[in-house]
Amino acid sequence: MVPCHIISVDVEDVIGSHIVDFEGTLVKNVIDLSGNVIETLKVGEHSQNIQDILQKTIQNLEMNRGCNLKGSIIVNKVNGNFHISSHAYAEAVMLLYAQRKMLDFSHNINHLSFGSEESISKITSITGGYNLSPLDKIKDYTHPKDMGGHFHNTYTTYYLDISPTKYLIGDEEEYSAHEYTYATQTVNTHGMPAIFFKFELSPIFINYRVSQMPLFVFIIRC
């Protein structure tokens, strides 16, 4: 588990945008081993003092507290990535390592989708929405190791192929979203641990039409 105080969400893309410790609407929920929320931190509102970050990180490590990220971010409609790491707090990480303390980036993805919350919710209620969030409930419990004084950290990458999608429901309702497929890879690294979501936008546009079968058709087929 990684304490919230030393986690950042960074965004970068092929046109040169690179935002470190992205704020958006994200919140960091400090959680215990059972997933209970102990404290909520708005991204960007906590202390930027290195010693303060180090102290709170060590305190939460000793109490077996982790972090739940919840909210949304806005990215450009070009290929890029967003990643969860401690890159924004590299100095604090080095001080942490000097005390032989490791950051465990094993994780559980509760939900990941692309599009407005209203559209995702509506489409999911009607179709199940699996293609909109196939990473939901995916777990990666590959833990870091201390190999004779050398840290082997985990570096997990999710490769996402995103397709713009339109759902036509009945004769009037229309919702736009983005469905995606994915592949994943986890490797050991001597560098800083991280979880990367690298996405590419597909040139293919997908249309679905959702309609109900008339009752008389059902009767005839019986």
Image (cartoon, rainbow, N blue to C red):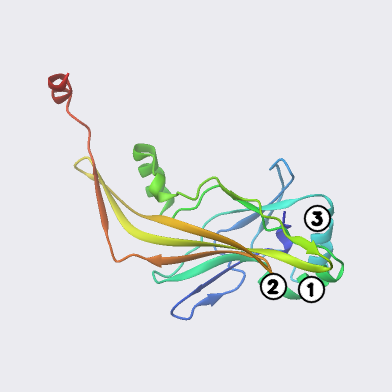
Is the residue under label 2 in contact with that under label 1 (CB below 8 Å)? no
Label disc, if present, on residue 61 of the rendered structure: 3
- Residue under label 1, please give it: 94
Residue 216 is at least partly visible in this image: yes
Cα–Cα span, label 2 and label 3: 20 Å
Mark 1: which secondary structure? helix
Residue 216 lies, in percent from the top left, at 13, 22
Cα–Cα span, label 1 and label 3: 16 Å
Judged by depth in the image, the label closer to the viewer, 2 or 3, is 2
The relative height of residue 114 versus residue 92 in the rendered view (above or below) is: above
- Residue under label 2, please give it: 191
Q: What's the amino acid at mark 2?
A: Gly
Is the residue under label 3 in contact with that under label 2 (CB below 8 Å)? no
- Looking at the image, tell me whether mark 2 or mark 3 is earlier in sequence order: 3
Circle 1 packing at 10 Å, graded few (<14), some (14-19), many (20+), is some
Mark 3: which secondary structure? helix
Cα–Cα span, label 1 and label 2: 11 Å
Q: In the drawing, does residue 189 fall left or right of residue 213?
A: right
The relative height of residue 151 versus residue 165 in the rendered view (above or below) is: below
Q: What's the amino acid at mark 3?
A: Leu
Circle 3 packing at 10 Å, graded few (<14), some (14-19), many (20+), is some
Residue 21 lies, in percent from the top left, at 62, 69
Residue 64 lies, in percent from the top left, at 79, 49
Mark 2: which secondary structure? loop
Residue 49 is at least partly visible in this image: no
Q: Residue at x 35, y 44 (%)?
A: 123
Of residues 126 and 14, the one drawn nearer to the viewer in this rendering: 14
Q: In the drawing, does residue 56 fall left or right of residue 16?
A: right
- Looking at the image, tell me whether mark 1 or mark 3 is earlier in sequence order: 3
Direction front: furthest residue: 148
Residue 164 lies, in percent from the top left, at 32, 59
Q: Quadrant of the C terminus?
A: top left
